[in-house]
Amino acid sequence: MVVKLWVMLWMLCMTSSAAQACEVMVQAAWARLPPPVSDTAAVYMTLINHCQQRKTLISVTSPQAAMTMMHHANMQMMKSVMLKPNQVFRFKAKSAHVMLMGLKSSIHMGEAVPLILHWQDGYVQVLHVEVKDMRGK
Amino acid sequence: MKTVIWIALFVLFLALFGLLFLQIKKPEVPSYLNSTGGDFQLETFQGTMKLSDLQGKVVLLYFGYSHCPDICPATLNVMASGMRLLNKQQQKQVQGLFVSLDPARDSPDKLKAYTAFFGPKIMGGTGKREQLDAIAQQWRFSYHTPEHPKTEFYVVQHPNFLYVVNKEGHVVALLDAKSTPQDVAAEVKIWL
């Protein structure tokens, strides 16, 4: 009986850690280099949910910015991004984007800006996004 | 010999006629643009200026604000890149103008630095709220700048298209957010 209980507990732990280990894949993440006088920058990335369960991004933060928000193309605030299994969501230029507001210091081309994705299941995903200068491109 | 000269003259005549035709033939301006636009006044780092001061140049006009992280820098990039596709002579006849709808945060000096980031052919200006409201009405767009924002990180709703103004100061085309630098250059060339 005790052995059975231990096995069940072990399986539960494995399942829970597997669920936690399954994180949404983030690809092509970058931040737009803002003009030096601007303290606002947009971040773009592609989210791919390879997990078997749906994942919901509820917020994004950055220690580099006083406030971070997800926006639709029309600048309306986006409360969350829900991804079904195998679903892809793109934050892209002139479309949905993450907005870094009140940058605490100016960001430079090639620099990596830390970004933290907060998922509804409590998972916290840390990434660094490269600052790109899009002038002339 | 005489025949060759006559043929050469005829070809030259055809070429000149074709060139003249291309110069005169401009596309028809959509009727809804006939009642759009008009002169307005702005505060720039060089002082007060009017849109009509730019007559004689094709003006690419965009309304936005400097705290806009996505569409404004993306559009100003396209505007600047489009102008860079023109030759030196053509570049002299075109001017980019960025009008901020957020005068509380965008001073003329700040706008000078902001627009210079994208290219030397773009200038920035803004005005008082009443002036901007009048411009919005005249230029047929809606915008929203919170009057009493709860936070300094507020968002301004603004139009996301480029106005193309001909040398006489009339709006002749609108370019949407999907436009490329090539689209901008091609449109400007029509009106030079």
Image (tube, grey):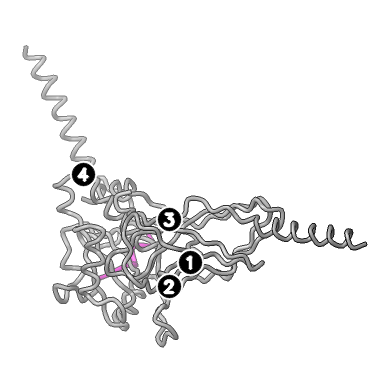
Dot 2 lies on which element? loop
Amino acid carrying label 4: it is Gln
Q: Position of residue B104 (x, y in %)?
A: 31, 81
| Distance between the alpha carbons at the discs numbered 2 and 1 | 8 Å
Q: Are marks 1 and 4 on the same chain?
A: no
Does residue B149 belong to the magenta stretch? no
Report the chain holding disc 2.
B
Which of the two discs, 1 and 3, sits closer to the camera?
3
Q: Which mark is residue B157?
A: 2
Image quarter (top left, top right, bottom left or bottom right) of the N terminus of chain A: bottom right
Between residue B49 and residue A4, name the one nearer to us. A4
Q: Which residues are magenta?
A: B31-39
Between residue A95 and residue B86, name the one nearer to us. A95
Vertical order, B46 against A6 (above or below): below
Q: Position of residue B123 (x, y in %)?
A: 21, 65
Mark 2 near mark 1, Cβ–Cβ under 8 Å?
Answer: yes
Is A13 left, or right, of A1 in this rendering?
left
Does residue B32 belong to the magenta stretch? yes
Which of the two discs, 2 and 3, sits closer to the camera?
3
Mark 1 near mark 3, Cβ–Cβ under 8 Å?
Answer: no
Seen at 33% across and 63% down, the residue is: A107
Mark 2 surroundings within 10 Å by alpha-carbon count, few (fewer than 14), some (14 through 19), many (20 or more): some
| Distance between the alpha carbons at the discs numbered 4 and 2 | 39 Å
